[in-house]
Amino acid sequence: MAHMTGVMTRSLAAAATLALTLAPSAGGPVTAGANPAEGDAGYSKTQNVMSLANSDGVPGRLYVTNQFTVSRGGDIVDYVAGNSGDGSMLAAEYKAVETGKTTQERVKAGQRVLPWSVSIAYGLNGPQVKPSQIAGASGLVDIRITVEPNAAVSNGYAENSIPVVAFTVPSSVSDDITVGDGMTLTMQGSDMLVSGVGEPGKRTVFDCYMNAKNFSMSQLAFVTVQADDTASFVDEVTAVSDRADALVNTLVVTGSASDRKLIEQLTAMRDREQKLGEKAIKEKTAAHKAAFSSYMAHYVGSYTTHLSGSIGSSTQMQALIGTAGELTGDTPMAQAVTDLANAVNAVSAAHEHDGAVHAIDDLIQRIRQRGTSGLADEISQTMAQESTEGATAYKAGQSQLSNAMIPYSMAYTDVYTKHLSELTGGTSAGAARYQQQAIDAANEEFSTSADLQDDNQKVQSAMDALAAASEHTGAANALQQISIQFAGALTSTASTGDAQGGDAAAGRVRYGWAG
């Protein structure tokens, strides 16, 4: 899908510029002068403030997450400032918390600026363009992300926190990406992960350029964390990302009843696909393993019948040529080839369920964040892209598998011949009696020999490529089903995120960052 970026920014909840006037769902007001209730749990509390921002980086609604890490189980009584202006406190009580608990609330009043500012600019073949103009475009794309301390905030948080940005670009969009200082580029599955780390309290400009085809990118995530070393830095970023992901998964920013109903229906569809996928992949993988073993047994069985004279320690080419003649026609060998091809297609097709799960999950997140406005058109566009990519990638994967099977089969035949020669004393006479023993020995060597791992890996990589291609096909099929089954909900609802919630035309944020 041609998604433009949303941003989640973060700040400490204790920052002086944030008036966190939350009203927890449990509990009631407590007068400041009274003796407040105390829980008996031992715990520490970490607060994160997060915001979903638009495609230019302007933050909207603020949310706070409270993470209670429990060292001694029991009751927790938590207090925050009330919003009545009379010094009252609001209490929330959580009973019998044994390990930990996370709560999430929207900052409903007293919203202030955050200690870091983020701005994003997009260029296409030179000139700067709007986010909507770059989606699906081809040419030289540049992305400039500027992160700097907010001058309106003087609490010192920015000076003691490390800013980080990250996003991914599908490899189908570009394999020629250049990043600026402070940024790194790594592979993450079939995507290129672009990330950058700035310095505490300083303005940082992150630049990224690429020759793009049908440009798209993931959500942009921004986080600032406080850390003294690499290990704590990684831990902080991971923890904040997990909390942000959990927060986004609970939000429906539009507040629309129809959106909530649609999300419930899509969630049920996603969960069904996930269960079907787990079952199908397990069953079809086992069937493929059996078909592969049967194919190799027929292959070397045919090869054995064509052996003549003395058997050396490597493949006898005359026997191999005889085996090749049985690959077509009405022969057991030809049937084994057909069975293996069917098993490959079946196990690959099982991964379509995974693609459906990912597509539906992404759709749910976007509806949560910005409603259904314009979503029908996006689904149609994405469906076409996924279908094309799936078909193209599957054809390439088939070619990759065919090329991988040639050196695998040759290496296997060499190993099989060596063991058969050892069992027969080097003669082809009566070799068929030792066929299964030689197969067992060859299988054992293939599973343990480091020298043969490369041949195994090439076959597995091709199977992985076919599975990934099928995920695209599964995504396209799921989106087509959704566009038909939920056509009314996708076109009749004019819901969008509110003015604070982000640019409805700009896209989604799956997870974002806080701290």
Image (cartoon, rainbow, N blue to C red):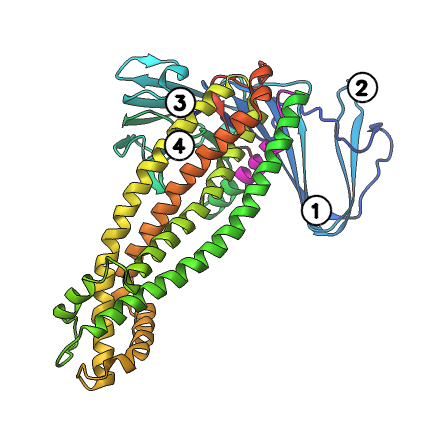
Q: Nearer the viewer, residue 215 or 70?
A: 215
- Residue 385: % across, % down: 38, 29
Give the foreground label among 2 and 1: 1
- Residue 15: % across, % down: 60, 27
Residue 146 image label: 3
Residue 43 image label: 1
Give the foreground label among 2 and 3: 3
Which of pointers 2 and 1 lies earlier in the amino acid sequence? 1
Give the foreground label among 1 and 4: 4
Which of pointers 2 and 4 lies earlier in the amino acid sequence? 2
Residue 86 image label: 2
Q: What element carries label 4?
A: helix
How far is mark 4 from mark 3, CA to CA? 32 Å
Instruction: Characterize the local packing of mark 3: few (<14), some (14-19) or many (20 or more) Cα atoms within 10 angstroms.
Output: some
Residue tagged by mark 4? 386
Give the foreground label among 2 and 4: 4
Q: Quadrant of residue 210?
A: top left
Q: Check contact, mark 2 vs mark 1: CB within 8 A.
A: no
Q: Check contact, mark 4 vs mark 3: CB within 8 A.
A: no
Q: Is residue 355 magenta?
A: no
How far is mark 1 from mark 3, CA to CA? 38 Å
How far is mark 1 from mark 4, CA to CA? 47 Å
> Residue 163, can we see it?
no
Q: From which residue to which does the magenta span run?
A: 240-255
Q: In which quarter of the image is the N terminus?
A: top left
Give the amino acid at mark 2.
Answer: Asp
Q: Check contact, mark 1 vs mark 4: CB within 8 A.
A: no
Taking the image as shown, residue 138 lies to the left or right of residue 37, namely left
Give the amino acid at mark 3.
Answer: Thr
